């Protein structure tokens, strides 16, 4: 098993604390609505975090995601939402930048589709040959041949 899965996450430590016992868990129905209503009532990120037993940063992120979702999917006015939920425009801009960088990195790691859409046949990508691997393979073959020759020579000497 890889080290990645054996390692404790930082959420394990956060969940030991009663104030952040829901950190890292999925959002349940009604939590986002409660967060938004508390923010409309001018509650601070820290107060909301204590109420929902999450981290202050997760509260901020959830509000930023909500605003982005409304602006991008429902053509809501971003400035009105920033004012309504008392969000700093620079913080939202930084969030969007980091979000876009993350998605770019994730998409760069995606493999191309295994099927050619035009003719329905599997697409097999030609992987570039690594010259170093070719040389290593040849060298290993030669080493094995030398071992075999030495063994034969030893057998011949032993017979005589």
Image (tube, helix red, strand yellow):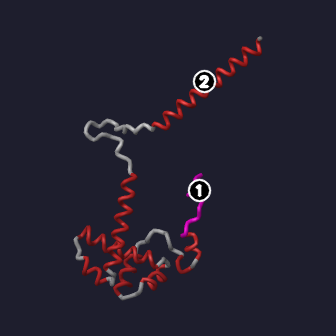
Mark toward the start of the polypeptide (1 vs 2) = 1
Q: Residues within 10 Å of mark 1 (few under 14, many from 20)?
A: few
Looking at the rendered structure, which numbered label has been put on residue 145? Answer: 2
Q: Nearer the viewer, residue 65 or 100?
A: 100
Residue situated furthest bottom in the rendering = 42
Relative to residue 4, is residue 126 drawn left or right? left
Image: magenta residue range: 1-10
Relative to residue 11, is residue 76 drawn left or right? left
Image quarter for residue 80? bottom left
Q: Residue at x 54, y 75 (%)?
A: 21
Q: Residue at x 65, y 22 (%)?
A: 148
Label 1 or label 2, whichever lies nearer to me, is 2
Q: Residue at x 35, y 74 (%)?
A: 64
Distance from label 1 to label 2 (Cα)? 39 Å
Q: Nearer the viewer, residue 20 or 28?
A: 20
| Percent x, y of residue 135 | 50, 33
Q: Secondary structure at mark 2?
A: helix
Q: Residue at x 22, y 71 (%)?
A: 75
| Percent x, y of residue 26 | 45, 68
Q: Check the picture and name the quadrant holding the C terminus.
A: top right
Relative to residue 101, is residue 77 drawn left or right? left
Query: Is-magenta flag for residue 125?
Result: no
Image quarter for residue 118? top left
Residue to which mark 1 is pinned: 3
Query: Is-magenta flag for residue 4?
Result: yes
Q: Is residue 154 above or below residue 69?
A: above
């Amino acid at each position: 098993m890889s080290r990645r899965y054996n390692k404790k996450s930082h959420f394990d430590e956060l969940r030991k604390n009663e104030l952040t016992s829901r950190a890292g868990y999925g959002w349940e129905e009604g939590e986002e609505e409660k967060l938004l209503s508390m923010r409309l009532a001018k509650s601070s990120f820290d107060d909301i975090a204590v109420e929902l037993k999450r981290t202050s940063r997760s509260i901020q992120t959830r509000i930023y995601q909500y605003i982005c979702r409304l602006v991008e999917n429902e053509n809501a006015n971003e400035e009105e939402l920033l004012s309504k939920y008392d969000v700093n425009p620079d913080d939202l801009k930084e969030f969007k930048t980091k979000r876009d960088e993350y998605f770019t990195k994730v998409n760069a790691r995606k493999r191309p589709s295994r099927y050619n859409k035009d003719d329905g046949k599997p697409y097999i990508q030609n992987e570039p040959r690594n010259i170093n691997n070719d040389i290593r393979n040849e060298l290993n073959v030669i080493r094995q041949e030398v071992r075999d020759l030495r063994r034969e020579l030893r057998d011949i000497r032993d017979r005589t």
